[in-house]
Amino acid sequence: MILSLSCPDRPGIVSAVSSILFETGCNILDAQQFDDTETDRFFMRVAFCRLEQSKSEAEVAALIEDLAKRLDMTFTLRQSSARKRVMLLVSKFDHCLADLLYRWRIGELPMEVTAIVCNHGREHLASSDLGDLPFYHLPITKQTKMEQEARIWELVQQTNTDLVVLARYMQILSDGFSAKLSGRCINIHHSFLPGFKGAKPYHQAHERGVKLIGATAHYVTSDLDEGPIIEQDVERITHRETPDDLVRKGRDIERRVLASAVRHHLEDRVILNGRKAVVFTG
Amino acid sequence: MILSLSCPDRPGIVSAVSSILFETGCNILDAQQFDDTETDRFFMRVAFCRLEQSKSEAEVAALIEDLAKRLDMTFTLRQSSARKRVMLLVSKFDHCLADLLYRWRIGELPMEVTAIVCNHGREHLASSDLGDLPFYHLPITKQTKMEQEARIWELVQQTNTDLVVLARYMQILSDGFSAKLSGRCINIHHSFLPGFKGAKPYHQAHERGVKLIGATAHYVTSDLDEGPIIEQDVERITHRETPDDLVRKGRDIERRVLASAVRHHLEDRVILNGRKAVVFTG
Amino acid sequence: MILSLSCPDRPGIVSAVSSILFETGCNILDAQQFDDTETDRFFMRVAFCRLEQSKSEAEVAALIEDLAKRLDMTFTLRQSSARKRVMLLVSKFDHCLADLLYRWRIGELPMEVTAIVCNHGREHLASSDLGDLPFYHLPITKQTKMEQEARIWELVQQTNTDLVVLARYMQILSDGFSAKLSGRCINIHHSFLPGFKGAKPYHQAHERGVKLIGATAHYVTSDLDEGPIIEQDVERITHRETPDDLVRKGRDIERRVLASAVRHHLEDRVILNGRKAVVFTG
Amino acid sequence: MILSLSCPDRPGIVSAVSSILFETGCNILDAQQFDDTETDRFFMRVAFCRLEQSKSEAEVAALIEDLAKRLDMTFTLRQSSARKRVMLLVSKFDHCLADLLYRWRIGELPMEVTAIVCNHGREHLASSDLGDLPFYHLPITKQTKMEQEARIWELVQQTNTDLVVLARYMQILSDGFSAKLSGRCINIHHSFLPGFKGAKPYHQAHERGVKLIGATAHYVTSDLDEGPIIEQDVERITHRETPDDLVRKGRDIERRVLASAVRHHLEDRVILNGRKAVVFTG
């Protein structure tokens, strides 16, 4: 099972958590914690297994819930084998979509895909193998944005979607929709934020003559391009490379950064910390 | 010898240059060129050696000068063994200074150090081995900025300095002084530009929760933090790292990025291209 | 057009090549050369375009052929738009295959896929979208190795295949077959050669406790794991990561290293230099 | 204080350790643990501070000692402010020495330098600022190796040296001397082990045509180039770079890899795990 928590810092938290697990007969497989001395907030992720003589899952959960009340703790506790339900939103560029689907098919991403939503027709995703996955073509215009988002939100609810991934969706979510998806919507921005916010970042990068380009996966907030960063990576470029070369290199960075961020989220490795994210990597 | 040039693009430039070298009996050791199709400008760097039967240096130079006139070419031509004269400006943080001096001492940077200028007293550089190098303590205040810069400029002229390196100098040069040093003053900015311009970039980076920090070496222009970029690099960080950790990691990135940029400049590998730089790396 | 050549070094080669292009009215778009002072061999790649008033392709080619004879030059000259014909060999792990096919579909890899050959049945490649591409299931055993390789060779000839890519093929080609494919067969080895040659490199790496793992794309020679290296890359790992984690990270490295090597080959950027390869990257 | 431990894995270790700290009134600042499921061994590093009402250092230590006996635990417990005593061994190349000394002077490496030992005269280290540090010129020949090592060992004992750093010492320690220094002698090997073991690794790398070179910091064992790896890093190279260029680039990698490994050791972040090392990075 995986326990992921945060709470105000105080002495004894690790002791309290580990004692519950010890006393209920569980064995800690992996534990990471972080004490943010600036905000005085404590973060912890514990992977543990119940052994033959362990107390029941419900009993363990009840004890943790009690502790959470005492320590003013926000937490999630779930079976390692329980797969999160993920909806993928995409626009015309499908390299992130194709990559996520491939990783899912070979078992690298422990998730259920609830739906693929595209604001363009299925024919635009011809290079991706969508298989039998539910596909929704939900076009969007300035005038229909509210209705389209309402339709997506309906789908999120109907399908019990836990996480929405903007896999190069190229649409800016409204503030209201961003708020509804807070902490469970990941975007890939095709620049090394905070450099080159906004449109056409690779062209901006080329224009500025930088020597490395990158991509950023972050939670979506109403503050565009400013949500908590989960993962970033870069690659070296030279003056010889055209904007098109940067776009090509960028595709590689984007898909691996997004896949990594999604995997961290699926494994409960990311905990929000104000406008930042604590990421307990493997 | 090293020939470094730029001119409007047109057919026949490589042919013209290489024919001059062939006909004067020189042998090309290394050549790189770049055709900027956006600005229609051509850039080239040729390293070549004169052989026993070669024409004299003056004759080669004369032919290249002729060609330059015909092709509206900006160029430099110099002996590979001729060392540029470099002045180092530094403030209280001396890690870049110490690093540049060490590289110079072991022969890694082909330069003559003309002077070390510091706006603080020599005692602040106690961790650096300045040896017998001429040291100038030139304090600066808002009121004395003009005079201090005038004094540095005087030193630049007296010492025939070819290149001024701001090795974490922490002072913003005035527009006028920047203009005088155009194309021959390199700064190290302790952020991965254009992210985190201005003061305390590592604290900004920590605040924003980025996953990689970097440094940028660029030519100084009157447009602060916007000069042509010569070199950049990054390192990965985690949520565990405090601003102090970032500053420590940053020192490593800064000194290697600055040293690399300086070396490229000393070897005539950098050619200005508007607000960008063409860098013919080795 | 792209001209790619190597020959014994001597003064005047660049001049001779560029003069031919100038005199036939062609314009050089990009040129890179390298002078290997150890072997006294010269390497060059020139991308150029014919203009309206240029001589015909045949005339340009004839002049280069003449020069090649004089300078004892090995060269290839082809239309930039001419696509190489590529056969993909794969075993049970299809991440490299899926990746190459996706890149091909979106136009990133300028090639024609002549065939996909697998020593296992098509059902093992269910995660890859093979589309209508010719698929050959050619099983192999110790006893049938010769026959299987003969069959592949036959296919190579029938389909006019220019390049064979071992996309995690997991079979060692015989010396004879390697020789036939010399210089036109690229393998991806799932280790950072020359470390961890042979089988199960990620397990070897885990066992040894290294801090970075990598992958290597190289031309196949009869000397196993020793062919000229085209591309390599690495990623950082920690003690927390199991061999399975390394295998997962490895898939990412393998597919991007192989794709990069294949692209370099398709664009005539790789020239053999004994047991090494000169790679003129973009 | 910093507690660093390893023991056979069993349920309740984290609980036991954290409970002792909680009950003695200490506050955990940072804790990392690792459960090696292959060897069934558990590793933990805890940084904690005593608060006003905490029990005395001796009382905390006594409780941990008790626990250690019960759990068959190997551990170290020390004041965060206690500095380890470090001896630096060097040969003619002093880039690692100069770098370590600079980092020490600016307070980046929390250590006392007990001595600098060189098998060549002080004049060979002219580019390094040795200041008033005790310097020993201990030449070595095949015939005097035993005596020289005995002399170093004597110095280690006299100076209460905790850690010996081979900062490009270029001499192979005898098996006996390696055994005496087991777990407290760090070497920098100028290759990305296990590739290019032995002499002249950069020349080997150039010869083989690899695309990345690296360096490795490891504990010294009698099995040459095979000790537990603490840190590694790489840099990209191209066919253009000569062995001399690789040596230059290598200096940068070596010094940062060694400094990083030494810092990890000084902060008790490295715990031996058979022929591997667990490294709890910051």
Image: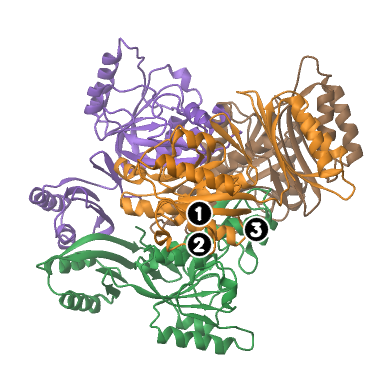
Chain colours: A orange, B purple, C green, D brown
**Labels 2 and 3 share a subunit:** no
Residue at position x 65%, y 26% from top?
Answer: A41
Q: Chain of mark 1?
A: A
What type is the residue that disc 2 sits on?
Answer: Leu
Q: Earlier in the sequence, mark 1 or mark 2?
A: 1
Q: CA distance from mark 1 to mark 2?
A: 8 Å
Front: mark 2 or 3: 2
The residue under label 2 is: A130
Residue C158, position as x, y percentages in the image: 41, 87
Asked whether A68 or B12 is in front, the reply is: A68
The residue under label 3 is: C205
Q: Is residue D186 left or right of residue A121?
A: right
Q: Is residue C248 left or right of residue B176?
A: right
Quick one: label 1, few (<14), some, or many (20+) residues within 10 Å? many
Q: Is residue B130 left or right of residue C146?
A: left
> Are the residues at dot 1 and dot 2 in contact (C-beta closer than 8 Å)?
yes
The tally of labels here is 3
Q: Relative to D280, is C90 above or below?
A: below
Asked whether A36 or B202 is in front, the reply is: A36
Q: Which mark is residue A116?
A: 1
> Residue C31 lies in what quarter of the image?
bottom left
Q: Which mark is residue B121?
A: none
Q: CA distance from mark 2 to mark 3?
A: 36 Å
What type is the residue that disc 3 sits on?
Answer: Ala
Q: Is residue C12 visible?
A: yes
Asked whether D31 or B101 is in front, the reply is: D31
What type is the residue that disc 1 sits on?
Answer: Ile
